[in-house]
Amino acid sequence: MARLAPGTFALTILLGILTALGPLSTDLYLPSLPAIARYFEVSSGQAQLTLSAYLIGYGIGLPLYGPLSDRQGRKKVLMAGLILYGVANALSSLAPSLEVLIASRLLQGLGAAGPLVIVRAIVRDLYEGRRAAQELARMGSIMGVVPAIAPVLGVLLELGFGWRANFVGTSLLAIGLALWAAAKLPETLTERLLAPFSLRVVLGGFAGLLTDRRFLPFGLMASATYTGLFAFISGSSFIYQLHFGVTPFAFALAFVLMVTGYIGGSYVSQRLAMRHEPRRLLLAGALLQAGGGLLMLAAVLALPPGPWAITLPMMLYSAGVGFSLPQSMAAAMLPFPERAGAVSSLLGIFQTGFAAIVGTIVGAFIDRGPLVLAGTIALFGCVALAIYPFIRQVLTAKQATE
Protein backbone atom coordinates (compact mmCIF):
# COMPACT_ATOMS: atom_id res chain seq x y z
CA MET A 1 0.00 0.00 0.00
CA ALA A 2 1.42 3.38 -1.05
CA ARG A 3 2.67 5.68 1.71
CA LEU A 4 1.87 9.37 1.87
CA ALA A 5 4.59 11.45 0.19
CA PRO A 6 6.22 14.54 1.79
CA GLY A 7 4.62 17.80 0.77
CA THR A 8 1.22 16.26 0.01
CA PHE A 9 -1.93 17.69 1.53
CA ALA A 10 -2.98 14.23 2.72
CA LEU A 11 0.17 13.90 4.85
CA THR A 12 -0.36 17.39 6.28
CA ILE A 13 -3.94 16.44 7.18
CA LEU A 14 -2.85 13.25 8.95
CA LEU A 15 -0.10 14.99 10.89
CA GLY A 16 -2.41 17.89 11.76
CA ILE A 17 -5.09 15.58 13.17
CA LEU A 18 -2.49 13.65 15.16
CA THR A 19 -1.29 16.88 16.79
CA ALA A 20 -4.92 17.77 17.51
CA LEU A 21 -5.34 14.81 19.87
CA GLY A 22 -3.87 16.84 22.72
CA PRO A 23 -6.23 19.83 22.38
CA LEU A 24 -9.13 17.48 21.70
CA SER A 25 -8.48 15.69 24.98
CA THR A 26 -9.14 18.92 26.85
CA ASP A 27 -11.54 20.88 24.63
CA LEU A 28 -14.09 18.13 24.01
CA TYR A 29 -14.86 17.59 27.69
CA LEU A 30 -14.37 21.18 28.94
CA PRO A 31 -18.10 22.03 28.76
CA SER A 32 -18.76 18.89 30.83
CA LEU A 33 -16.51 19.86 33.75
CA PRO A 34 -19.38 21.35 35.77
CA ALA A 35 -21.48 18.25 35.01
CA ILE A 36 -18.61 15.99 36.15
CA ALA A 37 -18.35 18.00 39.37
CA ARG A 38 -22.08 17.57 39.97
CA TYR A 39 -22.04 13.86 39.09
CA PHE A 40 -19.30 13.04 41.58
CA GLU A 41 -20.50 15.71 44.05
CA VAL A 42 -17.15 17.53 44.22
CA SER A 43 -16.00 21.15 43.93
CA SER A 44 -14.93 22.90 40.74
CA GLY A 45 -11.30 22.71 41.80
CA GLN A 46 -11.54 18.95 42.42
CA ALA A 47 -13.16 18.36 39.02
CA GLN A 48 -10.39 20.39 37.40
CA LEU A 49 -7.88 17.88 38.77
CA THR A 50 -8.91 15.70 35.82
CA LEU A 51 -7.30 18.34 33.62
CA SER A 52 -4.21 18.69 35.78
CA ALA A 53 -3.79 14.89 35.87
CA TYR A 54 -3.89 14.80 32.09
CA LEU A 55 -1.09 17.37 31.98
CA ILE A 56 0.98 15.46 34.52
CA GLY A 57 0.75 12.31 32.39
CA TYR A 58 1.54 14.38 29.35
CA GLY A 59 4.59 15.78 31.09
CA ILE A 60 5.80 12.31 32.07
CA GLY A 61 5.52 11.10 28.48
CA LEU A 62 7.22 14.06 26.85
CA PRO A 63 10.84 13.26 27.80
CA LEU A 64 10.37 9.63 26.75
CA TYR A 65 8.85 9.69 23.27
CA GLY A 66 11.32 11.99 21.53
CA PRO A 67 14.57 10.24 22.55
CA LEU A 68 12.93 6.84 21.99
CA SER A 69 11.86 7.82 18.47
CA ASP A 70 15.40 9.06 17.72
CA ARG A 71 16.57 5.49 18.42
CA GLN A 72 13.64 3.21 17.51
CA GLY A 73 12.03 5.12 14.65
CA ARG A 74 9.11 7.52 14.56
CA LYS A 75 6.31 5.20 13.52
CA LYS A 76 6.74 2.41 16.06
CA VAL A 77 6.78 4.81 19.01
CA LEU A 78 3.85 6.79 17.59
CA MET A 79 1.72 3.66 17.39
CA ALA A 80 2.45 2.81 21.03
CA GLY A 81 1.27 6.25 22.13
CA LEU A 82 -1.92 6.01 20.09
CA ILE A 83 -2.82 2.62 21.53
CA LEU A 84 -2.25 3.77 25.11
CA TYR A 85 -4.33 6.90 24.46
CA GLY A 86 -7.25 4.87 23.07
CA VAL A 87 -7.26 2.40 25.96
CA ALA A 88 -7.08 5.19 28.56
CA ASN A 89 -10.06 6.98 27.03
CA ALA A 90 -12.05 3.76 27.17
CA LEU A 91 -11.19 3.49 30.87
CA SER A 92 -12.30 7.10 31.45
CA SER A 93 -15.68 6.36 29.91
CA LEU A 94 -16.20 3.64 32.55
CA ALA A 95 -14.78 5.49 35.58
CA PRO A 96 -16.91 4.75 38.69
CA SER A 97 -15.33 7.53 40.78
CA LEU A 98 -13.49 10.80 40.39
CA GLU A 99 -10.29 9.12 41.56
CA VAL A 100 -10.47 6.54 38.76
CA LEU A 101 -11.26 9.27 36.24
CA ILE A 102 -8.23 11.26 37.40
CA ALA A 103 -5.99 8.19 37.07
CA SER A 104 -7.26 7.35 33.58
CA ARG A 105 -6.83 10.98 32.53
CA LEU A 106 -3.20 10.72 33.60
CA LEU A 107 -2.81 7.71 31.29
CA GLN A 108 -4.51 9.68 28.49
CA GLY A 109 -1.90 12.39 28.84
CA LEU A 110 0.87 9.81 28.81
CA GLY A 111 -0.46 8.43 25.52
CA ALA A 112 -1.27 11.77 23.90
CA ALA A 113 2.27 13.08 24.42
CA GLY A 114 3.54 10.67 21.76
CA PRO A 115 1.72 11.96 18.68
CA LEU A 116 2.54 15.61 19.36
CA VAL A 117 6.25 15.04 20.02
CA ILE A 118 6.75 12.63 17.15
CA VAL A 119 4.78 14.62 14.57
CA ARG A 120 7.00 17.66 15.18
CA ALA A 121 10.06 15.43 14.77
CA ILE A 122 8.61 14.08 11.52
CA VAL A 123 8.24 17.63 10.22
CA ARG A 124 11.89 18.30 11.06
CA ASP A 125 12.88 15.05 9.31
CA LEU A 126 11.11 16.09 6.12
CA TYR A 127 11.49 19.87 5.85
CA GLU A 128 14.13 22.58 6.26
CA GLY A 129 14.15 26.27 7.20
CA ARG A 130 11.09 28.38 6.51
CA ARG A 131 9.39 25.42 4.87
CA ALA A 132 9.35 23.64 8.25
CA ALA A 133 7.75 26.69 9.91
CA GLN A 134 5.21 26.88 7.10
CA GLU A 135 4.31 23.22 7.52
CA LEU A 136 3.90 23.63 11.28
CA ALA A 137 1.63 26.63 10.66
CA ARG A 138 -0.44 24.64 8.16
CA MET A 139 -0.78 21.85 10.67
CA GLY A 140 -1.75 24.50 13.22
CA SER A 141 -4.59 25.66 10.98
CA ILE A 142 -5.83 22.08 10.65
CA MET A 143 -5.30 21.44 14.36
CA GLY A 144 -7.33 24.55 15.13
CA VAL A 145 -10.39 23.21 13.33
CA VAL A 146 -10.63 20.28 15.74
CA PRO A 147 -10.82 22.34 18.97
CA ALA A 148 -13.12 24.78 17.16
CA ILE A 149 -15.77 22.10 16.78
CA ALA A 150 -14.81 20.04 19.84
CA PRO A 151 -16.70 22.05 22.51
CA VAL A 152 -19.88 22.09 20.43
CA LEU A 153 -19.55 18.37 19.76
CA GLY A 154 -18.80 17.81 23.45
CA VAL A 155 -22.00 19.62 24.45
CA LEU A 156 -24.06 17.62 21.96
CA LEU A 157 -22.56 14.35 23.21
CA GLU A 158 -23.19 15.32 26.82
CA LEU A 159 -26.78 16.40 26.18
CA GLY A 160 -27.50 13.28 24.14
CA PHE A 161 -25.61 10.58 26.03
CA GLY A 162 -23.96 12.09 29.12
CA TRP A 163 -20.41 13.25 29.78
CA ARG A 164 -18.95 9.75 29.41
CA ALA A 165 -19.72 9.83 25.68
CA ASN A 166 -16.88 12.32 25.18
CA PHE A 167 -14.35 9.67 26.15
CA VAL A 168 -15.99 6.99 24.02
CA GLY A 169 -15.65 9.32 21.03
CA THR A 170 -11.95 10.02 21.59
CA SER A 171 -11.25 6.31 22.06
CA LEU A 172 -12.83 5.53 18.70
CA LEU A 173 -10.89 8.38 17.07
CA ALA A 174 -7.61 6.97 18.40
CA ILE A 175 -8.41 3.59 16.87
CA GLY A 176 -9.15 5.19 13.50
CA LEU A 177 -5.95 7.24 13.55
CA ALA A 178 -3.87 4.21 14.51
CA LEU A 179 -5.24 2.27 11.53
CA TRP A 180 -4.66 5.24 9.17
CA ALA A 181 -1.11 5.81 10.39
CA ALA A 182 -0.24 2.10 10.23
CA ALA A 183 -1.36 1.94 6.62
CA LYS A 184 -0.18 5.28 5.23
CA LEU A 185 2.45 6.99 7.37
CA PRO A 186 6.04 6.47 6.16
CA GLU A 187 9.00 6.05 8.48
CA THR A 188 10.85 9.37 8.20
CA LEU A 189 13.88 8.73 10.40
CA THR A 190 16.74 7.88 8.03
CA GLU A 191 19.58 7.57 10.54
CA ARG A 192 18.89 6.28 14.03
CA LEU A 193 20.76 7.59 17.04
CA LEU A 194 23.16 4.94 18.32
CA ALA A 195 23.56 6.27 21.86
CA PRO A 196 21.81 3.99 24.37
CA PHE A 197 18.49 5.07 25.83
CA SER A 198 19.00 5.78 29.51
CA LEU A 199 17.89 8.43 31.96
CA ARG A 200 21.43 9.76 32.27
CA VAL A 201 21.89 10.12 28.52
CA VAL A 202 18.47 11.70 28.01
CA LEU A 203 18.90 14.20 30.84
CA GLY A 204 22.41 15.03 29.64
CA GLY A 205 21.04 15.82 26.20
CA PHE A 206 18.35 18.03 27.69
CA ALA A 207 20.92 19.85 29.83
CA GLY A 208 22.95 20.64 26.73
CA LEU A 209 19.92 22.10 25.01
CA LEU A 210 19.01 24.23 28.03
CA THR A 211 22.37 25.98 27.86
CA ASP A 212 22.22 26.48 24.08
CA ARG A 213 21.03 29.95 23.09
CA ARG A 214 19.84 28.54 19.76
CA PHE A 215 17.13 26.71 21.72
CA LEU A 216 16.39 28.45 25.02
CA PRO A 217 14.70 31.75 24.01
CA PHE A 218 12.51 29.99 21.48
CA GLY A 219 11.54 27.33 24.01
CA LEU A 220 10.62 30.04 26.50
CA MET A 221 8.59 31.91 23.88
CA ALA A 222 6.65 28.75 23.02
CA SER A 223 6.07 28.11 26.73
CA ALA A 224 4.79 31.60 27.54
CA THR A 225 2.56 31.53 24.46
CA TYR A 226 0.99 28.19 25.31
CA THR A 227 0.65 28.92 29.03
CA GLY A 228 -1.53 31.97 28.41
CA LEU A 229 -3.68 29.91 26.05
CA PHE A 230 -3.94 27.06 28.54
CA ALA A 231 -5.01 29.43 31.30
CA PHE A 232 -8.09 30.16 29.18
CA ILE A 233 -8.62 26.48 28.37
CA SER A 234 -8.43 25.40 32.01
CA GLY A 235 -10.50 28.17 33.58
CA SER A 236 -12.94 29.43 30.99
CA SER A 237 -15.68 26.82 31.43
CA PHE A 238 -16.14 27.79 35.07
CA ILE A 239 -16.00 31.55 34.37
CA TYR A 240 -18.55 31.39 31.56
CA GLN A 241 -20.95 28.87 33.05
CA LEU A 242 -20.74 29.56 36.79
CA HIS A 243 -19.74 33.23 36.96
CA PHE A 244 -21.45 34.62 33.85
CA GLY A 245 -24.28 32.06 33.97
CA VAL A 246 -24.23 31.09 30.29
CA THR A 247 -25.33 27.69 29.03
CA PRO A 248 -22.81 24.97 28.07
CA PHE A 249 -23.72 25.56 24.42
CA ALA A 250 -23.10 29.31 24.70
CA PHE A 251 -19.73 28.58 26.29
CA ALA A 252 -18.92 26.23 23.43
CA LEU A 253 -19.68 29.00 20.93
CA ALA A 254 -17.40 31.40 22.81
CA PHE A 255 -14.68 28.77 22.70
CA VAL A 256 -15.20 28.41 18.95
CA LEU A 257 -14.67 32.15 18.53
CA MET A 258 -11.39 31.92 20.44
CA VAL A 259 -10.21 29.06 18.24
CA THR A 260 -11.27 31.01 15.15
CA GLY A 261 -8.72 33.63 16.16
CA TYR A 262 -6.07 30.93 16.39
CA ILE A 263 -6.99 29.47 13.01
CA GLY A 264 -6.85 32.93 11.46
CA GLY A 265 -3.43 33.63 12.96
CA SER A 266 -2.06 30.25 11.83
CA TYR A 267 -3.41 30.74 8.31
CA VAL A 268 -1.90 34.20 7.91
CA SER A 269 1.36 32.99 9.45
CA GLN A 270 1.77 30.11 7.02
CA ARG A 271 0.96 32.41 4.10
CA LEU A 272 3.68 34.83 5.20
CA ALA A 273 6.27 32.29 6.35
CA MET A 274 8.07 31.96 3.01
CA ARG A 275 8.22 35.74 2.37
CA HIS A 276 9.06 37.25 5.76
CA GLU A 277 11.78 36.66 8.31
CA PRO A 278 10.77 34.59 11.35
CA ARG A 279 11.61 37.42 13.75
CA ARG A 280 8.95 39.65 12.18
CA LEU A 281 6.29 36.97 12.54
CA LEU A 282 7.38 36.30 16.13
CA LEU A 283 7.17 40.02 16.94
CA ALA A 284 3.69 40.22 15.43
CA GLY A 285 2.59 37.24 17.51
CA ALA A 286 4.03 38.62 20.75
CA LEU A 287 2.37 42.01 20.17
CA LEU A 288 -1.00 40.34 19.54
CA GLN A 289 -0.66 38.25 22.69
CA ALA A 290 0.33 41.14 24.92
CA GLY A 291 -2.30 43.40 23.38
CA GLY A 292 -5.07 40.81 23.74
CA GLY A 293 -4.13 40.02 27.34
CA LEU A 294 -3.94 43.65 28.43
CA LEU A 295 -7.19 44.46 26.64
CA MET A 296 -8.90 41.61 28.49
CA LEU A 297 -7.55 42.80 31.83
CA ALA A 298 -8.68 46.37 31.14
CA ALA A 299 -12.13 45.20 30.04
CA VAL A 300 -12.62 43.08 33.16
CA LEU A 301 -11.54 45.96 35.40
CA ALA A 302 -13.39 48.78 33.64
CA LEU A 303 -16.55 47.21 32.18
CA PRO A 304 -19.50 45.38 33.71
CA PRO A 305 -18.54 41.70 33.82
CA GLY A 306 -19.74 39.75 30.81
CA PRO A 307 -18.65 37.08 28.32
CA TRP A 308 -17.52 39.53 25.64
CA ALA A 309 -14.93 41.09 27.97
CA ILE A 310 -13.16 37.72 27.82
CA THR A 311 -14.10 36.42 24.36
CA LEU A 312 -13.05 39.27 22.06
CA PRO A 313 -9.61 39.92 23.64
CA MET A 314 -8.98 36.17 23.70
CA MET A 315 -9.54 36.02 19.95
CA LEU A 316 -6.74 38.58 19.60
CA TYR A 317 -4.45 36.65 21.94
CA SER A 318 -5.09 33.34 20.17
CA ALA A 319 -4.36 34.94 16.79
CA GLY A 320 -0.96 35.80 18.24
CA VAL A 321 -0.54 32.17 19.27
CA GLY A 322 -1.06 31.22 15.63
CA PHE A 323 1.91 33.41 14.72
CA SER A 324 4.25 32.68 17.63
CA LEU A 325 3.88 28.97 18.29
CA PRO A 326 4.83 27.46 14.89
CA GLN A 327 7.64 29.95 14.36
CA SER A 328 9.18 29.47 17.81
CA MET A 329 8.96 25.67 17.59
CA ALA A 330 10.51 25.57 14.12
CA ALA A 331 13.32 27.95 15.14
CA ALA A 332 14.08 25.81 18.22
CA MET A 333 14.25 22.57 16.23
CA LEU A 334 16.06 23.58 13.04
CA PRO A 335 19.62 23.72 14.46
CA PHE A 336 19.38 20.12 15.77
CA PRO A 337 18.37 17.76 12.91
CA GLU A 338 20.13 14.79 14.51
CA ARG A 339 18.11 15.18 17.75
CA ALA A 340 14.74 16.32 16.45
CA GLY A 341 12.86 13.95 18.74
CA ALA A 342 14.70 15.08 21.87
CA VAL A 343 14.23 18.76 21.01
CA SER A 344 10.53 18.19 20.38
CA SER A 345 10.27 16.44 23.76
CA LEU A 346 11.98 19.30 25.57
CA LEU A 347 9.73 21.84 23.87
CA GLY A 348 6.74 19.88 25.10
CA ILE A 349 8.16 19.72 28.62
CA PHE A 350 8.60 23.48 28.63
CA GLN A 351 5.09 24.11 27.38
CA THR A 352 3.15 21.65 29.50
CA GLY A 353 5.30 22.12 32.60
CA PHE A 354 4.54 25.82 32.82
CA ALA A 355 0.94 25.23 31.75
CA ALA A 356 0.32 22.53 34.39
CA ILE A 357 1.64 24.73 37.19
CA VAL A 358 -0.27 27.80 36.06
CA GLY A 359 -3.42 25.78 35.30
CA THR A 360 -3.40 24.34 38.83
CA ILE A 361 -3.02 27.82 40.35
CA VAL A 362 -5.78 29.23 38.16
CA GLY A 363 -8.02 26.30 39.14
CA ALA A 364 -7.42 26.96 42.84
CA PHE A 365 -8.54 30.59 42.54
CA ILE A 366 -10.95 30.49 39.60
CA ASP A 367 -14.04 30.71 41.85
CA ARG A 368 -12.99 34.30 42.65
CA GLY A 369 -14.05 35.47 39.21
CA PRO A 370 -12.79 36.58 35.78
CA LEU A 371 -10.03 38.84 37.10
CA VAL A 372 -7.94 35.73 37.91
CA LEU A 373 -8.22 34.52 34.32
CA ALA A 374 -7.66 37.92 32.70
CA GLY A 375 -4.65 38.72 34.88
CA THR A 376 -2.97 35.41 34.06
CA ILE A 377 -3.47 35.77 30.31
CA ALA A 378 -2.23 39.37 30.38
CA LEU A 379 0.85 38.32 32.36
CA PHE A 380 1.96 35.67 29.90
CA GLY A 381 1.21 37.83 26.89
CA CYS A 382 3.60 40.41 28.33
CA VAL A 383 6.16 37.71 29.15
CA ALA A 384 6.14 36.59 25.50
CA LEU A 385 6.77 40.17 24.40
CA ALA A 386 9.60 40.54 26.94
CA ILE A 387 11.33 37.43 25.54
CA TYR A 388 11.28 38.77 21.98
CA PRO A 389 14.43 40.99 22.26
CA PHE A 390 16.51 37.89 23.12
CA ILE A 391 15.06 36.08 20.11
CA ARG A 392 15.91 39.04 17.88
CA GLN A 393 19.51 38.93 19.07
CA VAL A 394 19.84 35.23 18.24
CA LEU A 395 18.24 35.53 14.81
CA THR A 396 20.21 38.66 13.94
CA ALA A 397 23.48 36.95 14.88
CA LYS A 398 22.53 33.90 12.85
CA GLN A 399 21.70 36.02 9.82
CA ALA A 400 25.05 37.83 10.09
CA THR A 401 26.99 34.54 9.96
CA GLU A 402 25.11 33.13 6.95
Image: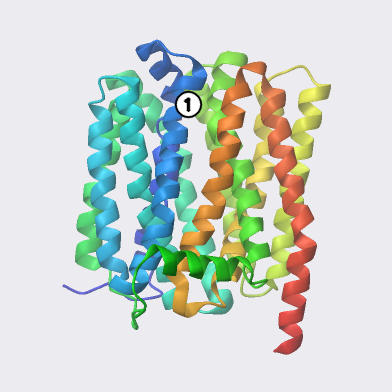
Query: Which quadrant of the view contains residue 185?
Result: bottom left
Identity of the residue drawn at 48% across and 26% down: 48
Q: Secondary structure at mark 1?
A: loop
For this rendering, which residue is in front, 307 or 26?
26
Identity of the residue drawn at 74% across and 49% down: 383
Q: According to the image, label 1 marks what residue?
A: 48
Residue 324 in view of the camera: no
For this rendering, which residue is in front, 293 or 249?
293
Q: Quadrant of the N terminus?
A: bottom left
Query: Which residue in the rendered view is the most extreme toward the bottom?
Result: 402
Residue 89 in view of the camera: yes
Identity of the residue drawn at 59% across and 57% down: 325
Quick check: 231 above or below 80?
Answer: above
Amino acid of disc 1:
Gln
Percent x, y of residue 201: 43, 70
For this rendering, which residue is in front, 307 or 123?
123
Q: Quadrant of the C terminus?
A: bottom right
How many numbered marks have been drawn onto this rendered protein structure?
1
